[in-house]
């Protein structure tokens, strides 16, 4: 990634993913304190179902940068988005079909991870001190 603007955007996307991981940890700890280990594990699964495909999408979307590689950028972005959708569905099927979970922590954490994209920029751009 030689394009400075693209590198900045990639770094912001990685910061968002780190923020989402921290949010999942906070959710899991909260559910652990409130309802026990199964709920905490369910919250972690809910976070993984969203955050892992989002990370894979980010890696694919920023694989190519620059106007000369526009065709590669578009195809990589489309591949990343398609893979993100497929992985999310596969992860939901796997977790709901094969793992004992509490549904509320799973869905709450998944929903908060999705919603974090709306409020994360506020926290990421906040200057401390």
Image (cartoon, helix red, strand yellow):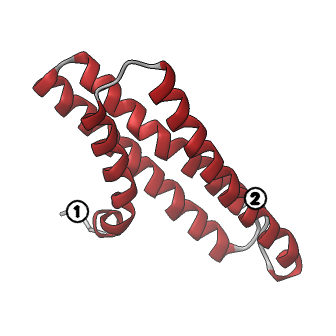
Q: Position of residue 32 (x, y in %)?
A: 19, 24
Q: Quadrant of the N terminus?
A: bottom right
Is residue 111 shown left or right of residue 36? right
Q: Position of residue 109 (x, y in %)?
A: 31, 43
Q: Residue furthest bottom?
A: 67
Q: Relative to 122, does residue 31 appear above or below in the rendering?
A: above
Q: Residue at x 62, y 51 (%)?
A: 84
Q: Residue at x 67, y 53 (%)?
A: 59
User: For the residue labelled by badge 2, is the local secondary structure a helix, a strand or a loop?
Assistant: helix
Q: Residue at x 50, y 37 (%)?
A: 92
- Residue beneath disc 2: 79
Which label sits on residue 128?
Answer: 1
Identify the mark nearer the N-term, 2 or 1: 2
Q: Relative to 102, does residue 125 appear above or below in the rendering?
A: below
Q: Residue at x 62, y 56 (%)?
A: 58
Disc 2 versus disc 1: nearer the observer: 2
The foreground one among 120 and 106 is 106
Q: Position of residue 82 (x, y in %)?
A: 69, 57
């Amino acid at each position: 990634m030689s394009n400075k603007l693209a590198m900045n955007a990639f770094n912001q996307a990685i910061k968002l993913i780190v923020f989402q991981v921290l949010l999942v940890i906070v959710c899991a700890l909260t559910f652990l304190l409130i309802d026990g280990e199964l709920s905490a594990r369910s919250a972690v699964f809910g976070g993984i179902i969203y955050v892992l495909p989002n990370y894979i999408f980010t890696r694919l979307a920023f694989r190519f940068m620059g106007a000369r590689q526009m065709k590669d950028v578009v195809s990589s972005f489309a591949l990343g988005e398609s893979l993100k959708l497929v992985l999310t569905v596969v992860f939901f099927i796997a977790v709901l079909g094969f793992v004992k979970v509490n549904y509320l922590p799973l869905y709450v954490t998944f929903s908060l991870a999705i919603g974090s994209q709306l409020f994360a920029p506020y926290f990421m751009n906040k200057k401390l001190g």
